[in-house]
Amino acid sequence: MGEQRMIAIDSEYGSGGREIAREVGEKLNLPVYDKNIVELIAKEKNVDMTPFQQNDEAPIPFLTRHVGEHTTSFEEHLAYMTFEFIKEHADNGESFVVIGHCADEVLRDYEEASLIFITGNLLDKDLRIQNDFQVSSKQALNMIRKNDNRRKRYHNQYSSYSWGDSRGYDLCISSSPLDIAGTVEAIVGYVNTRYK
């Protein structure tokens, strides 16, 4: 196995996945691709991505029309653009951390990729959302339900494994017993051991 390291992280809403991904990137000195993917695609392709930004990681609408390989869905166009972005960077031998965007599916056949899923118990996720967004428990639980449903629908439209199915990942870990810092250390330890 060479020097390339690619870490694809999926996470339940409220489990701290985005923060964990950023800290893993910092510890391993790797760029992190998250919501910034749309901006990076715009820069690389020299195109205006403004119409697409609100559709990032959105499920395909039910009334989408397809004619051959063409679609009326902004969501689907953007999904395939992000998959192409991830694959191009992988094929160029780059190392990176990517959160969401079906990266586990895009990178599944790359030996240099670590596919990770982060979960957490409901109470911890509830409390984290309440603190992060200054909302009630009822609002936090509703946010968790809605966002997890959106992530699951988006992922399952493109992936050969269901979102959160342990068979589709190299490592599944709960951030609840370890908290953010401990989960970061566990993932970094796994990656460093794997790539020795």
Image (tube, grey):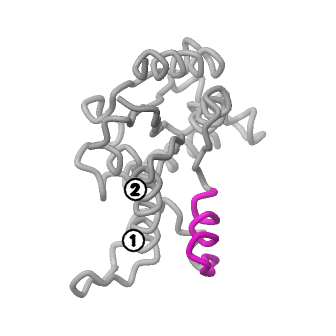
Which mark identifies residue 67? none
Q: Is residue 65 magenta?
A: no
Image quadrant assignment for residue 22: top right
Task: In this rendered view, identify the residue nearer to me: 28 or 166.
Answer: 28
**Residue 58: x, y in percent?**
47, 62
Which mark identifies residue 76? 1
Q: Nearer the viewer, mark 1 or mark 2?
A: 2
Residue in view at x 26 percent, y 81 percent = 69
Q: Under tag 1, what secondary structure?
A: helix
User: In this figure, what is the number of numbered marks?
Assistant: 2
**Residue 169: x, y in percent?**
33, 32
Residue in view at x 41 percent, y 60 percent = 83
Q: Under tag 2, what secondary structure?
A: helix
- Does residue 67 sit above or below 19 in this rendering? below
Which mark identifies residue 87? 2
- Does residue 170 sit above or below 109 in this rendering? above
Name the residue at the top extreme: 177
Residue in view at x 68 percent, y 32 percent = 26
Q: Specify which label sits upstream in the sequence, 1 or 2.
A: 1
- Does residue 114 sit above or below 50 in this rendering? above
Extent of the magenta region? 36-50
Residue in view at x 61 percent, y 72 percent = 42
Q: Amino acid at mark 1?
A: Glu
**Residue 4: x, y in percent?**
45, 37
Task: In this rendered view, identify the residue nearer to me: 113 or 168.
Answer: 113
**Residue 59: x, y in percent?**
41, 63
Location of the C terminus by quadrant is top left
Q: Amino acid at mark 2?
A: Lys
